[in-house]
Amino acid sequence: MGTEEKQIKHAADHAAEGAGGGPILFFIIGLAIALGIGWIAFPKALYSQKQQPFDFSHSLHNGLVDNGCESCHFFREDGSYAGVPKLAQCIGCHEDVQGSTPEEKVFVEEYVKKGKEVPWLIYSRQPDCVFFSHAAHVKVAKMKCEECHGPIGESKNLKPYEQNRITGYSRDIWGQNIAGIKTHTYDRMKMDDCADCHKERGVKASSVQTERDACFVCHK
Amino acid sequence: MKIDRRSFLSLGVGFGAGIALSPLPWKLTDDSSIWTQMWPWTPVPERGESRYVNSVCTLCPGGCGISVRKVEDRAVKIEGQKGHPVSNGGICLLGLSGLQLLYGPYRVKYPMKRREDAKRGQGKWQKISWDEAMSEVAKKLGDAKDKTACIMDSDKGTVPQLFKTLLTGLGSPNFMRTPSVEDSFELALLKTCGYPASAGFDLENADFVLSFGAGLLEGWGAPVRTFKANSLWKDKKVPVIQIEPRLSNTAAKSDKWIPVNPGTESELALGIAHVLIKEGLAKAEVSDSFKKIVSEGYAPDTVARITGVEAGVIVGLAKSFAAASKPLALCGRGKGATPISLNETLAVYALNALMGNINQEGGLFAVPQPDYIKWAKTNSNASVSKLLYGKDASLKALLVANANPLYSLPDTQAVKTALDKIPFIVSFSSYMDETAQYADIILPNHCYLERYEDVPAPAGYHKPLIGLSRPVVKPQFNTKHTGDVVIAIAKAMGAELPYDSYETCLKETFGDTWEAFQKDGVLTADFTPPAPSGKIELNETSLKPVALEGESSAFPLVLVPFDSMRLSGSSIGEPPFVIKTVDDTILFKNDICIEINPKTAQSYNLSDGKYARLTTPKGSAKVRVHLYEGIMPGVIAMPRGLGHTPGFTGNDKYLAGKGVNVNELMGSAECPDGLNAAYGIRAKLERA
């Protein structure tokens, strides 16, 4: 190839680049793949799905008890919060099968009769480094359960428990929205969400000792 | 279109931008920070209902009340029990760390038998069933009959009584209690007051405290109570005078430290008694024989020569002691883990008697021995010195419970030799301690937080009191209450015992009072002590300082062990929490430090931090030098409570290989009344 020919070829290449926008195309392809990974594949891969030992209807039970949520999720005498009920609380009604649901049968036969606690997976369990007092929020600040936990009392089924493969905690802490965007107060349970509410309500003295907010109020 | 380097770069940039625009990096950052808080070895308390169970700590003779916080079935913290008569809400370092003894790796988890092919102490065990273990023990004891012996840390309470009953059934009188200052107190009180009694000190009400080497801040008596009393004395400006050769914590915190030649405390006490009698300062009468001995032989000048304390100081001490309205003289070296001579005990008793404070408020009480165990028909008592150190090699079986003679008795080698002569050794230890390792069979007891037990007569407490130690958690392993095991063995051998289980035995021993005992955790009784007779008879054959083992030409120095609040000195050894608090002037990395006066060190050309070889007639050890002005020249002080050799290697990094057991270097110096009153041993030092 002569010098002239070379020059012509070079010019043609330039023309092709200008017209097709190769780098831009590749940029867009890279961007699209990454966005796909980040927004779709990553959340799928991050969480594993686990089923509860058996299904449970909050709405059914809510209709049968007198004292709303606190009938089962009660405060102990010393003011500490009992959390998810133990067998001892259920046994009052479920010593024998009451209704006709297969779930109740599983419960009575596999757990009640064998005296085995149900290994419930707890959606709202905070990391071990978090100290949270239900009494301060429910008894003192008169907050409703729904503000943090949502309308779980109306649910007919238990949703699958999504466990973060890295931290081992429930997806409900970060929230369903992978970007962390929330529409309800109960969509997320991260520290920022605690702070949002505290800020909104002007809670500035969480610590009885120091009369102000401080790390150690929640991180013991 | 051509794919070139630029295309890949663009793809990479696009990918990077896409990732940055997705939640992935932010979410991953957040998750990984939470992940770092999730190390599986980070202890996280169980969730659940919390409650407290009150019990009594039995890790030392103090008998403090404890309150154990539990979350569900897990004990999570031991606290002091508020309102308990002995400790009232206080707790010591060891007591606080007790959960590490419950859940730690030193537990013996099931009955074990030494493997046929293994020698004692090799650590080769086979797991056996309780039935096998107990029938083997019953068979061996049946063969050994009256050649069976038992050693325990206490001879009071239902469990020691069960052992005594077992021995009596076998025709054996060989029940031994590990020696301690209690031996000296009990013997002295029996001789002076005429009834079996424990020594009690009304520390809280004294207004002048003269302590002859009692380690008030080193774990003497019931340590928590003594610490509290010490604080009370500081508040009330009660003078505390500490007499001992070493500047201990007690001496450092006292109002006045009087360094005395080691082993001459008894002479100093008699010198003070001399001044009290001669100057007419005595408020009560004592035996003429005592007065005669003291008046003739213990003038301040003479005593000054023996003790190294100036005559003027002795007179001054006597006068200020007599000027107080409720002066109290105390004795018992360090924690009181070793006996002192009978004469020393009597001399200190005499100071209290001369002030008329025997069985009086702020004084010394002869608290009658508890006698609530009506079913006990035993009178079995033998001395360690005769059975373990003596020439007698006729013992065929030894039962070891709540004791660790191979660690805690002086002259470890001699104890080992004695044990070697005994063909069958049974350990009831919950832990793989030194003696358990040397046993033929281990029948592990429940740990102290898993069992019922009556705990009579807390050390140094001035009123009759029984504490109830009760299960805080259910047994963690396949262990059995030693009380139940002894009952079963005794029954198998045909002994007459009215009970089938230890719990029934305990319940019925207390009869009508059981319910109140269960509820309160303590039982107290009123007692009206008889008026003291003033009878004090010194043993005239031993009226000279205890002679230490070893020739002074070959062993020019004197080695004295010392106690520390941070070393339990107990048979079990220090849990990790405790060992971590030990000063590096006591334990430097894994080396034991000895205290040596700079003057003495100079003559051996030793400087601080150098290694030396310390040799006594009994043994030798490599030690690290710690120069200390607070120890007399010519004397070397060595901490007691180190050098444990726990049995499960691999799990024992907190305890194994830490320093040297001072008992390996110690010997005995028996006073004529059978008490080993060795306060030290002669020693020599070489650079290493």
Image: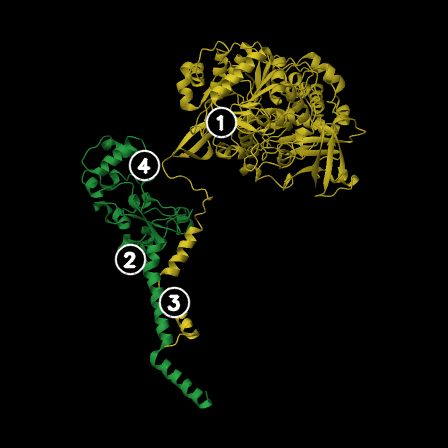
Chain colours: A green, B yellow
Helix, strand or loop at label 4? It is loop
Q: Which residue is mark 2?
A: A182
Host chain of mark 4: A
Q: Quadrant of residue B384?
A: top right
Q: Looking at the figure, which quarter contains the C terminus of chain B?
A: top right
Q: In the image shown, does B55 or B165 lie closer to the viewer?
A: B165
Q: Which residue is mark 3?
A: B15
Label 1: how many residues lie within 10 Å, few (<14), some (14-19) or many (20+)?
Answer: many
Label 2: how many residues lie within 10 Å, few (<14), some (14-19) or many (20+)?
Answer: some
Residue type at tag 3: Phe
Disc 2 with disc 4 on a shared chain: yes
Host chain of mark 3: B
Q: Residue furthest bottom?
A: A4
Q: In the image shown, does B157 or B543 lie closer to the viewer?
A: B157
Image side of residue B342 versus residue B452, left or right = right
Q: Estimate the spatial distance between the alpha carbons at disc 3 and disc 2, rounded to whole Å.
A: 27 Å
Disc 3 with disc 4 on a shared chain: no
Front of the two marks 4 and 1: 1
Label 3: how many residues lie within 10 Å, few (<14), some (14-19) or many (20+)?
Answer: many
Q: Estimate the spatial distance between the alpha carbons at disc 4 and disc 1, rounded to whole Å.
A: 38 Å
Q: Which residue is mark 4?
A: A76
Helix, strand or loop at label 3? It is helix
Front of the two marks 3 and 2: 3
Label 4: how many residues lie within 10 Å, few (<14), some (14-19) or many (20+)?
Answer: few
- Asked if residue A129 shows in the view, the reply is yes
Where residue B566 sits: x, y (%)? 58, 35
Residue type at tag 2: Lys
Q: Estimate the spatial distance between the alpha carbons at disc 2 and disc 4, rounded to whole Å.
A: 32 Å
Residue type at tag 1: Tyr
Q: Which residue is mark 1?
A: B110
